[in-house]
Amino acid sequence: MFRFIRKMITWFILLLAVAAFGYFVVLPRVLPVKYKEQVEKYADLYDVEESLIYAVIFCESRFDPNAHSRADAKGLMQVTTETGWWVASRVETLDAETLDLKDPETSIAIGTWYLQWLEEKFQEVQPTVLAAYNAGHGKVSQWLADKQYSEDGYHLEEIPFAETKGYVKKVELVQKLYELCYGM
């Protein structure tokens, strides 16, 4: 009986060591929490969930501030120059003339403000907000006006772009992982 208990304790300690290794070594590499100061700052300032900001950064750039897309989106949150200028014209602390979308602080500020603006525009219907972040708010407004894609004008029953549909699912999944793993 004593050998069995000792063996169970050994297995339990081994399991704890593996779990600790996973949590403290593997998880931060697989699901990073970088730019924490900036994410917290703009999440508070614009009332956007930190987990959503991290999920968008993860899906858009994998935390690479120098990321650049085919659509000419740049930085952590993959903001286009046009959107960056538009946001900068509405936010007093940003200057459209000196805008550097590859600067993490600027990218997170603009991307988070834009998420907050989309949440207001689309009445916090998250799949619609994420579709607009990916495909553009004008395109999503067109889809919402089309009974083929939206019965009520708020919720998209169908997203006609496969890339956008996949993007929405991916960001929502990654956001849930951030919430689960980091208690956000």
Image: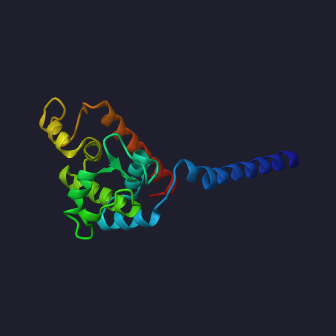
In x, y percent, where is residue 100? 34, 60
127, 38: nearer the viewer: 38
Spot occupied by residue 65 in the image (x, y as percentages of width and height) = 43, 54
Count all numbered tags in the image, as a single digit: 0
- Front position in the image: 31 or 110: 110
Task: Kindly identify the residue that appears in the image at 25 percent across and 44 percent down.
Answer: 132
Image quadrant assignment for residue 168: top left
Q: Spot the residue most to the front.
A: 97
Is residue 18 or residue 26 the one in the foreground? Answer: 26
Q: 140 above or below 162? A: below
- The reply, left or right, for residue 121 in relation to residue 28 is left
* Image spot of residue 38 (x, y percent): 41, 65
Residue 161 vertical placement versus 82 (above, below): above
Quadrant housing residue 42: bottom left
- Residue 65 is left or right of residue 156, and the answer is right
Do we see residue 112 in this rendering?
A: yes
Task: Tell me which residue sits at (20%, 49%) in the image.
Answer: 122
Residue 152 visible in rendering? no
Colour scheme in the image? rainbow
Q: Could you tell me residue 6's position as x and y percent?
A: 83, 50
The reply, left or right, for residue 28 in relation to residue 40 is right
The correct choice, above or below, for 91 with respect to 141 in the image is: below
Q: In the orientation shown, which residue stands out farthest toward the bottom? A: 93
Which residue is depicted at the point 26% across and 41% down?
135
> Quarter of the image containing the C terminus?
bottom left
